[in-house]
Amino acid sequence: MGCLGSMADQRTFDDVSPEVWDRVKAIARDRFGTIFAPDASPSGTATTATPIGPVVLDYDHDPDARQITCTLRRKPFLVLSGQIWTGLAETIERCKQDS
């Protein structure tokens, strides 16, 4: 298992309403077993277990600005950060279309 250490990678996604963020979280829970802590807070940590180690993202949702900022804190060495960001961006876009 690898760790990003001090080289944390961060992304901000725009036009993310509270409803869209709730849908994204539901998909992450249902499909990947992601645990959000604290669950009902707009800011926290999302942890997803994988067979080769956890993926840990810090998140901060600003409902007034309709933005979510995520910081990739830890990932398995074999998982590319681009895969994580692409998956998150695609899920957000799908949830926007469903709203």
Image (cartoon, rainbow, N blue to C red):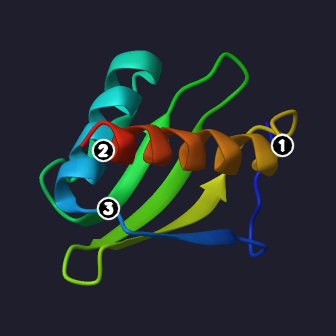
Q: Which residue is mark 2?
A: 36
Relative vertical location of residue 21 with respect to residue 50 in this rendering, above or below: below
Q: Dot 1 surroundings within 10 Å: few (below 14), some, or many (20 or more)?
A: few
| Secondary element at image label 3 | strand
Name the residue tied to disc 1. 80
Viewport quadrant of the N terminus = top right
Give the mark nearest the N terminus, 1 or 2. Answer: 2
**Residue at (24, 62) in percent of width and height:** 17
Near-viewer residue (63 or 38)? 63
Instruction: State the mark number for residue 44.
Output: 3
- Residue 16 left/right relative to 38: right
Q: What residue appears at the point 40 percent right and 22 percent down from the top-left corner? A: 33
- The answer to whether marks 3 and 2 mark residues whose Cβ atoms lie closer than 8 Å is yes
Residue 73 % position (x, y):
61, 60
Q: Residue at x 57, y 41 (%)?
A: 90
User: In this view, which residue lies farthest toward the left?
Assistant: 40
Near mark 2 (Cα within 10 A), the count class, few <14, some 14-19 or many ≥20, is many
Q: Is residue 78 above or below residue 17?
A: above
Position of 75 with respect to 90 (left or right) is right
**5 or 45, which is in the foreground?**
45
Q: Position of residue 25 (x, y in %)?
A: 31, 40
For the C terminus, the quadrant is top left
